[in-house]
Image (cartoon, grey):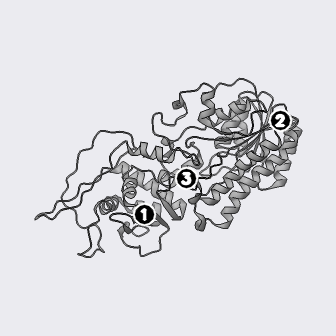
Amino acid sequence: MLPNTGKLAGCTIFITGASRGIGKAIALKAAKDGANIVIAAKTTQTHPKLPGTIYTAAEEIEAAGGKALPCVVDVRDEEQITSAVERAVERFGGIDILVNNASAISLTNTLDTPTKRVDLMMNVNTRGTYLTSKACIPFLRKSKVAHILNLSPPLNLNPLWFKQHCAYTIAKYGMSMCVLGMAEEFRGEIAVNALWPKTAIHTAAMDMLGGSGVESQCRKVDIIADAAYSIFKRPKSFTGNFIIDENILKEEGINDFDVYAIKPGHPLLPDFFLDEHPDEIMKETESHAPVPEVKEEKPQSEPQPPPRPQLQSQPPPPQPSSPQPQLRPQRPPPLLQQQQPSRPHFGAVEETFRIVKDSLSDEVVKATQAVYQFELSGEDGGTWFLDLKSKGGKVGHGEPSDRADVVMSMTTDDFVKMFSGKLKPTMAFMSGKLKIKGNMALAIKLEKLMTQMNAKL
């Protein structure tokens, strides 16, 4: 990890969204130098799923050696921003560094993104960054350090990063466009840069987005804190850059990045907006184990059942493991009670649903309370459903009797990989292999369920 040098001693750093996660990690890194930290966030009471408040963060910052000023700030409110800036200047005498970290996310497509969610992302990400920068710039101009750092991605116009979550991409790119414009506008006075992770970073928000087990594919927030610290050490002439955390730390001489991994050696989930990742990581994770093969039955006097797909017990993407013994059960009763005798055999898809059915229980239904519909393309494709609202749970071919809460579209091959633990839904969604319509929170519940099924089977 990057050692502290004491360079930020006495500097005042204004950080939005610093009550938890990446913002707090940057604050704690600077606090070790003896920096003054303005915690500009709106959380004053502990959230059941997102621990941390501006007051608990202040305690940690002062315990680490810094001075803290907790300010209640919703970056959508210009008056709250202005008030916090005035308090910071009054308390510490000025502002040396601004970190625009506060952000809102909704990974939903155009038709499934409510207007209020669009407004939230635009107002927090783009407008909030712009207004906070505007309020701090007069004081940053007086500083010898003078840095603005936005936690935002490189501007990448590959349609891949727009088609699944257009509103989020626009809002996040708005932060990056502030870097592009302000770096040039204030060249020589203030360094303005963007920082983005190469891989997913483990935070409470990531747990909510990625589901159970996602942490093993993430790095710690420490890598972002170290990268930010590296940027703050640089002169004002270092400006207008879209920096990837791993790249700048390599310039610092760091080559062992396992120290930042939650689970060293485990394949990492790439972050958004970096073109080189999706296909490469997909190939890497798919190379760890073969796809469960379920062969079509051939006419015989006594038909034999297809083998069960082997579901991995570890969170996907899997690492190489020793072969599992092949199970040879007696032929089970037909899975789908609705089927007609003449319906064609569905191979791997039907076998996957049979295993899913065997894993269901009243407890699973009670915990999930959702109906999922799968639109599968390719060989053995069609419409299937998983009803986790009805007693005991139901699966079947065709549309569910109740309206689906979530509709997932993908190929049959990717569907089998996803349920066998070989393809993580988050990865499939990011790379465009999986399209989701409906309630994203319930989609995440399904991912957690799949992890539980893999562990059980």
Residue at position x 75%, y 48% from top?
Answer: 178
Q: Residue 209 shows which numbered tag?
A: 3
- Image-quadrant location for residue 287: top left
Return the x and y of residue 24 as percentages of the image width and height: 68, 40
For mark 1, what is the residue?
A: 365
Identify the residue shown where x is 85% and y is 48%. 83
Asked if 330 appears above or below 185 in the picture, the reply is below
Depth order, front residue of 110/139: 110
Residue 418 visible in image: yes
Q: How much space separates mark 3 and mark 2, taking CA atoms?
A: 40 Å
Please state if 13 lies on the left or on the right of 329 as rendered.
right
Which callout, 3 or 1, points at the residue further toward the start of the chain? 3
Between circles 3 and 1, the one closer to the viewer is: 3
**Crowdedness near tag 1: few (<14), some (14–19) or many (≥20) residues, C-alpha within 10 Å:** some
Q: Residues within 10 Å of mark 3 (few under 14, many from 20)?
A: some
In this rendered view, identify the residue nearer to me: 452 or 419: 419
User: Could you give the CA–CA distance between mark 3 and mark 1, rounded to whole angstroms?
Assistant: 21 Å
Q: Locate residue 28, reporting x and y percent.
A: 69, 34
Give the amino acid at mark 2.
Gly
